[in-house]
Image: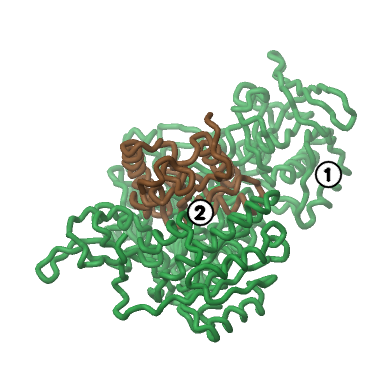
Chain colours: A brown, B green
Amino acid sequence: MAENPEGWQPRILAIICNWCSYAGADLAGGARIQYPPDVRAIRVMCTGRVDALFIMKAFTDGADSVLISGCHFGDCHYLEGNYKAAKRMFLVKSLLKNIGLDDRRLRMTFVSASEGAKWAKVIEDVVNVTHELGPSPFNKEFGELKELV
Amino acid sequence: MAEAVSPTTSEKPKAPRIGVFVCHCGTNIAGSIDIDAVKEYVKTLPNVEHVNDYKYQCSMPGQSNIQEAIREKDLTGVVVAACSPRLHEPTFRAATKDGGLNPFRFEMANIREQNSWVHMHDPAGATEKAKDAIRIAVAKASLLEDLYPKSVPVEHAAMVVGAGVAGMQAALDLANSGIKTYLIEKAPSIGGRMSQLDKTFPTLDCSQCILTPKMVDVGRAENIVLMVNSEVEEVEGYIGNFDVTIRRKATGVLSPAEAEAKGIVGGGCTGCGDCDPICPVTKPNEFEMGMAPRKAIYIYHPQVVPLLYTIDWDSCVKCGLCVEACGDKKAIDLEMQDELVKVKVGTVILATGFEVFPIETKEEWGYKRYDNVITSLEFERLICASGPTGGHLVRPSDGETPMRVAFVLCAGSRDSTGVGKPYCSRFCCMYSLKHAHQIIEKIPGVMPYIFYMDIRSFGKAYEEFYYRIQDEGAKFIRGRVSNIQEDPVTKNLRVYAEDTLLGRPMELEVDMVVLAAAVQPTELTNKTRKLFGVSCSTDGWLLEAHPKLNPCGTTTAGVFVAGACQSPKDIPDSVASAEGAASAASIPIHRGEVELEPYYAMCVEEKCAGCGLCVNLCPYSALALIEKDGKTVMQVTEAKCKGCGTCGGFCPGGAIWMNHFATPQIVAQIDAFLLGGEQ
């Protein structure tokens, strides 16, 4: 693993659904399960709401990683929004590869309202993977290609 | 991204003026987050006109601060940085409204559940995260708009799924309050698990004696539409207006009412039983846990409600002998088909109960390998006067009366091996004490041995019952049974355990072992909950909206839970939760209307190309293409739209405006996080 630049802290965006993952994250809080503070979450009603452009916007804004988290398959509050979001993620991942971004910077997970511990684990994983990958090339301060965007 | 304007706004919006209110939540937030640093930072954010911090923003003075600031500073939006919006969003929306602003101009920054509580040892990281969270919230609040919840009428009817003691109680309460209630039961009779029990702890009431009056009440209640042999097939709609399709399985037998409808005067099943002796097919009776026979045309037991025979199609050979025996009543129709019934209800209660964990998976205890190892539910049938042995406890291997009986508690419960269940099944301690009492009462000289981890006798008069059984002479051994072996000749059982009070291993020969097997949600519960969009915990039990403050509600508005489908519950707790659920479910119905969150989709017609991609994506068929001014555009049926935003996430032209989660609002949040926005 290459040395990461001094002073760099991962900037990770999470877009999570109201019914499962947001509730799971709240549960982790209630249970005081500690995890790294590098992720900022935006709440939507369903991961189906997540436009591919939101993710691309986050990366062009310099996000080091993006996490999308919803309900388990078959458990979507809106029946099938998470399926549609998951299908969209394959498209976005291939777009990321095309522009030279490691597609591990985008992750979709499924965390239910009762999985507080899993939420903490997911955050830890995402933060660890981001540390492994280092700053995104488009990171506004530390990225190699910051001039391009 | 291009500036987009909501289709609702005709006039140019006012320049945003946002008030930010930071909550200490005592030390819950202030203990990890530097509130002063956050406050100073927030003052530098664009559009922020007012910043305030308070020990408890949700308190009356905290809310008053918000209302005053709205009026004095002419705010256009409110941000409260506090706990989760899942907890206090309604509180602060109401405060915002009381201050004179539209309640949907409120946004919450979660700096407790998702910040101070999970970064307790990293105050610097937590403080930075709180600054970002508030910056993101301010960005969204700057773009929020007035929204108005829509009111919809509530159908004056309810549905209860599952007719065990909880479902029956819930249905009776609803019906007695004047609501037409559909009670759906998959089995041929109502009554559920409680009807299989002999006595109930700690009062030793006969279970059937106290249950059957309720069953009869349900059968007679004018407001209850009872549907046995029925399952929920499909659910559409939302609170106030659920359209539920029920599959009424063909029973092959007409009730008197159904017969009359078919023009058979004085016909239909009267439960006379003439068909029973003549049926040539014999099957194990599942009500008796397979320990007694039944015919292919059968009733579970004489007290069933409704008293109607049912044909088990898997075993019926359609010989027609029963049709002959039934004679002029013409109650039997061997060609009967399943029927789909559609009903409309305002609210729904799920009371789908539990089933016994397959304890044979704990192989060390030999259930299903050793004849004389039985489960507690089998014990209930054997000790029950109306059971297969007339209430005489006998060994399945030889019909002898057992004189030494071991009761193994926590059989599959509180089990961290991965085979059993991690939770406590809650009622096993108490019914095992009751079982010990019953054999002491019925079999002179019998010795019950109770192997326990610790006796959980938490209810009213339960601890006293525990002392009573100790005094009656039952032997208590604190230790888990590690192994059971059968003597191949005598079929007696050797029980191996560690007596943890004496600190030494022990073995004991007994005539019979009763496993107090764990309980788990039924398989059908999982299918049914998905139809209603109800979540479950990792163990599969249905998830309540809040474990303490909303234990009967679910996250799906209008759907409630009662009884042991939520978690293991004994009879008093099941009945209490059923009454709670019935009360909660009746509120919207008696009110007559509910407000729905105005998060529906809207079409920005100038941008819509009429491609129709969204139409197929919508899971609720809420979208359609129409011709308007010579152009094809999408149109939303607001009442059908539930606001998931899946259409908005895919629209290639950005032509769908999701109220409260609009693209410009979300993009502003992303930009605020990553590009900053400090002045």
Relative height, residue B639 to residue B469 (above, below): below
Please identify the quadrant where the N terminus of chain B is shown. Answer: bottom left
Chain letter of disc 2? A
From the image, tell me which residue sits under label 2. Answer: A41
Residue drawn at point x = 9 percent, y = 68 percent: B630
| Residue neighbourhood size for the residue with mark 2, other residues' Cα within 10 Å, grouped as few (<14), some (14–19), many (≥20) | many
Horizontal and vertical percent position of residue B322: 36, 41
Locate residue B485 relative to residue B563 in the image: left or right.
right
Q: Specify the amino acid type for callout 2.
A: Ala
* Residue B641 vs residue A126, the one in the foreground: A126
Q: Name the amino acid type tagged 1.
A: Ile
Q: Nearer the viewer, residue B222 or A107?
A: A107
Mark identifier at residue B397? none
Q: Chain of mark 1?
A: B
> Can you say whether B53 is above or below B306 in the image?
below
Residue annotated with mark 1? B469
Q: Is residue B609 above or below residue B475?
A: below
Q: Is residue B298 visible?
A: no
Discs 1 and 2 share one subunit:
no
Q: Position of residue B619 (x, y in %)?
A: 31, 54
State the separation of the CA atoms marked 1 and 2.
55 Å
Tell me: B84 left or right of A83. Answer: right
Image quadrant in which you'd find residue B15 = bottom left
